[in-house]
Amino acid sequence: SKKPSQAILEEYCSSNSNTTSGTTSPSSLESPTAEIDKDPLAQQKGVQLPYPFLPTCLAKHDSHFIERRARQFPADLKLPLLPPESACAVIDAQDKDTPDSWVTRDSRLVRLTGKHPFNAEARIRDLYTAGFITPTNLFFVRNHGAVPKVDFERAEKWELKVHGLCANPTTFTLANLRTRFRVVTLPITLVCAGNRRKEQNVVAKSLGFSWGAGGVSTALFTGVYLADLLEYVRPTKGAKHVVFEGSDDLPNGPYGTSQLLSWARNKSKGMMLAWAMNGLPLEPDHGFPLRLVVPSQIGGRSVKWLARIELSPIESQHHLHFHDNKVLPTTLTAEQARAEKHWWYDPRYLIRELSVNSAIAYPNHDEILDTSLHAPGSTYALRGYAYAGGGRRITRVEITLDEGSSWRLAQITYFEDAFREVEEEDFGVDPIYGVLGTNEQGENCFCWSFWECEATMEELKGAGSIMVRAMDESLAVQPRDMYWNPTGMMNNWWFKVCIHDLG
Ligand code: MTE
């Protein structure tokens, strides 16, 4: 009998053998036919897809949307990229007696804010070892409140209201979205603006909780381009911002934020309305059944449990649009920032794009490097991740073992390199070059990269620390010094692991 991955591959081969390249024409988007509405896959048939085998199995998954939401996926329907432990999430005893007592979670995630709300990261070692595509259950979670409970049966009927300054205001169901617009799958790294905040909190407590370096993860997100939806509703004169609102019930109203309309309309920025993550419906923690995904900007812009989009002359007025995701001046203390509200409304302090950043996963902070096990001259592979914002690619990663007096270049693995290996190993087919990890025009990079650099055990033994810094396509390089700020955000100074020689 055939292996499941073979079956999927064969299906892909046969379903793609007659396809022609091209893009969906705007007219078919504007007037969806009954036929398209009936067959969710119809629109994909004439389109050149960036991942020939993935969308086939994802799309198949979509047609079994509700049934496959269960944890017990039949083996042949599982996305072959996911390691087996991906299906191991269970209800955690710690969530008992909280509003999230129904949400399944992986116990390997480290809780950062006590019991509730749930905010958690994977240990950096687990994250790195899991690979480029983070298994969904190890993907970091940032929830400001309780997870909205949405019945799986209701998912297809989930409503997204799009209104405001537009000629064609429409309320879409999830089923409408997937049938009216072209469905795409992109690998996208999300990063919380507070990633690495612990380092600031050690210096002086900020307003936020202590993230380690695991407030970052990467997944294959499936959905439709926001730009396509905006083209459909036709923004009118005066519309300058696109406001997004989730359906979580927070003390100061639902979570919401906005994008500049000019950015949101730009397809190369890759903003998506996504319903699937790593080939399966979103987990409740990650926005089930629908979320916005904004690549290369801070995670706070990727509104979960998305219910409403408004075309507006002004930016979002949501409480957390102002009172979160800001880098206020370092001259302010946390107390001053809390007391003096006007700082939060200064538009200059809003964070949009991620800044260039990197971290070390090997060796870990608490790792013991047993030099007695290594012959003189043997090497240790230093490893970690790096990412940048604004669609920019990481162009160099450098390591220092002498606090910055001298540097050595690390080898960088980009998404397409990592994916090529998986593909060759698992599917035995030629890789698709140049598309993975980028948007469809191939211009932007929405993914982290991994890096590696060899050092001899002697070098490590003699060094007081290992530090890493990365540079991106705009030649922005991570700064040496911490920029302490009241919210403890955008922590991208050189990442350091100290070596204590106890021998
Ligand atoms: N959307 C809603 N509705 N509610 C939230 O609390 N948190 C935001 C964003 N979207 C949030 C939200 C923040 S701050 C981040 S970093 C990302 O979701 C985290 O996404 P994740 O939990 O899927 O990793």
Image (spheres, rainbow, N blue to C red):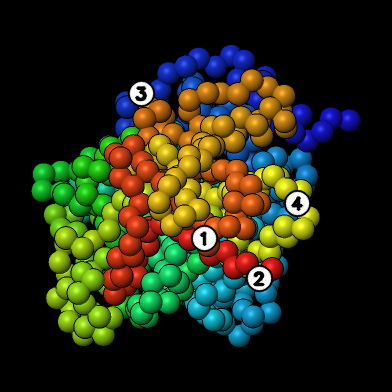
Mark 2 surroundings within 10 Å by alpha-carbon count, few (fewer than 14), some (14 through 19), many (20 or more): few
Q: Residues within 10 Å of mark 4 (few under 14, many from 20)?
A: some
Q: For residue 220, which quarter of the picture?
A: top right
> Residue 25: which disc?
3
Which sits earlier in the primary sequence, circle 2 or circle 4? 4
Percent position of residue 353, x then y? 31, 51
Disc on res. 502: 2
Q: CA distance from mark 1 to mark 4?
A: 19 Å
Earlier residue among tags 1 and 2? 1
As helix, strand or loop, the secondary structure at mark 4 comes to loop
**Residue 414 in the image: x percent, y percent?**
51, 36
Is label 2 within 8 A of ligand 1 (CB to nearest ligand atom)? no
Amino acid type at mark 3 = Ser
- Of the numbered discs 1 and 4, the one sitting upstream in the chain is 4
Looking at the image, do the residues carrying marks 1 and 4 touch, with CB atoms under 8 Å apart? no
Residue in front for this viewpoint, 391 or 378: 378
Left/right placement of residue 340 relative to residue 401 reads: left
Q: Is mark 3 within 8 Å of ligand 1?
A: no
Q: Residue sitting at 68 percent across and 60 percent down?
A: 369
Q: Tell me whether circle 4 and circle 3 mark residues in contact (CB < 8 Å).
A: no
Q: Rounded to the nearest whole Å, what is the CA distance between mark 1 and mark 3? A: 56 Å
Q: Which residue is mark 1?
A: 465
The reply to whether the C-beta atoms of the residues labelled 2 and 4 are less than 8 Å apart is no
Query: Can residue 149 be spotted in the picture?
Result: no
